[in-house]
Image (cartoon, rainbow, N blue to C red):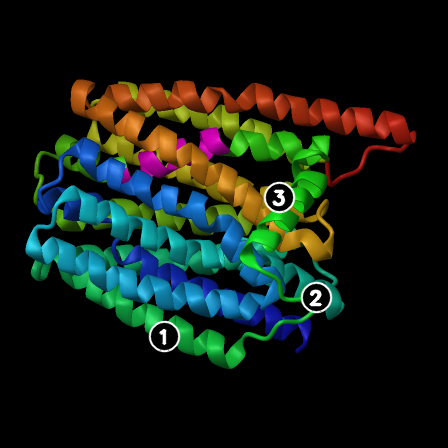
Amino acid sequence: MRADQLLRTYVVLSAVSTGASSMIWGINTLFLLDAGLSVGAAFAANAFFTVGMVLFEVPTGVIADSVGRRTSYLLGTATLFGSTLLYLLLWKVGAPFAAWAVVSMLLGLGFTFFSGATEAWLVDGLQATGYTGSLEAAFGKGQMASGLAMLGGTIAGGVLAQVTNLGVPYVARALLLAVAFVVAWRQMRDVGFTPKPRQSVVAGMSDILRESLDHGLRKPQVRWVMLAAPFAAGVMGYGFYAAQPYLLQLYGDSGSYVVAGLSAALVAGAQIIGGASASLIGKTFKRRTSVLLIGSVGTVIVLVGMGLAHSFWTVLILLTVWAILSAATSPIRQAYLNARIPTAQRATVLSSDNLLSSTGGVVIQPVLGRAADVWGYGPSYLLGAAIQLLAVPVLLLTLRAADATRRDRHATPEPVA
């Protein structure tokens, strides 16, 4: 495969898979509440989703590095297809919380097959086929495609829920996942890496732990970026899904599913803007870590504003700004990490990074959900801002580590830092 074919396949897969997932993003919290769960229980269900990601990141990393990244993607698509239909069944029968917890973990399993493997597949393939562009540009294209797909998916999901019921968007999601499976089966080929010899899951987990430590947490420049992830990811997961009922509360109509879908669509539009600007931002700042630090501080400010505001339009605008900040910094962060990870361990370390992010969601989402139950959505966003603020000193340590590395090597500043 040529580099342009690899990148085109990545963009198409990003669009189709995000389009599938986003069919329910605008109404997922409303769906759980309609099923009889409280706000706290709804976010506890989301937390079990992240528990699934924590539990399965390492085993699925073994599959990606020993069997193949394409196989991992196909397994992820099939798992999400089945678990999405199970979610629909739970809603239909009014299942107890324990059932939601189990199926949410299965959804997490599905996404772990994607995490690390898809990104590693792209980067290794581009390097092997002589790609001359920047990683920011490549990831930015994928993010723009995801943003466009999310824009259409969230609006379609909200409209479908409005004119039919909250279950129909889940049917549409399952159908699109089937399309993603077919596209990956036909177009995705493992290029640029040699699979490891097959081994047991236990032995593979041991290898992954050791390699993720060697090439991840034991590298100061990588360590602090990874350790900042739990704070940001946990708050982001809560903030996006809590925005649906929060905005409807401020709007004054809890049954306006179209409004919930449109608010998520605005986030998608912000992703397109952020993805398009990633390459320019990468050229403007000498250090990628500076971009990450500015984005984290900006997020704290936006969260405080969302917590203090009592206006639908103000919160909607701030949510859009938050999404732009996240979308603009995400490709920068991906490029930063990939520039420091060897090919052979790429999926391993990226899976470990996702593992840390998911761990933050397991703890932070139910805490913020409980805060919303007790004090309301506004105060829960203020608490989220305080948690996000914890990422700032961690990112400052990344800057110190980068400076120390340059001094040790007597090197000039590197633009990738």
Residue 20 picture quarter:
bottom left
**Percent from the top left, x then y, of residue 270?**
41, 45
State which tag comes first along the sequence, 1 or 3.
Answer: 1
What's the amino acid at mark 1? Answer: Val
The residues colored magenta run 230-241
- At 37% from the left and 35% from the top, the residue drawn is 362
267 vs 146: above or below:
above
Q: Nearer the viewer, residue 307 or 66?
A: 66
Would you say the magenta stretch is mainly helix, strand or loop? helix
Residue 202 badge: none
The amino acid type, in three-letter code, at marker 2 is Phe
Task: Give the image location of residue 302, x and y in percent.
Answer: 39, 26
Report the number of discs.
3
* Measured Cα–Cα span from mark 2 to mark 3: 20 Å
Of 361 and 166, the residue lying toward us: 361
Magenta stretch holds residue 112 = no
Looking at the rendered image, the disc whose residue lies closer to the viewer, 2 or 3, is: 3
On the rendered structure, is 368 left or right of 270? left
Residue 309 seen from this side? no
Q: Which residue is mark 1?
A: 179
Q: Nearer the viewer, mark 1 or mark 3?
A: 3
Location of residue 197 (image quadrant): bottom right
Could you say which disc has been placed on residue 209 in the image?
3
Residue at which label 2 appears? 193
Local packing at callout 2 (Cα closer than 10 Å; few below 14, some 14-19, many 20+) is some
| Alpha carbon separation for disc pair 1 and 3 | 34 Å
The quarter of the picture where the N terminus appears is: bottom right
Identify the secondary structure beneath mark 2: loop
Q: Quadrant of residue 398?
A: top right
- The image shows residue 332, relative to residue 289, as above or below, that is below
Nearest to N terminus: mark 2 or mark 1? 1
Lateral position of residue 344 relative to residue 155, left or right: right
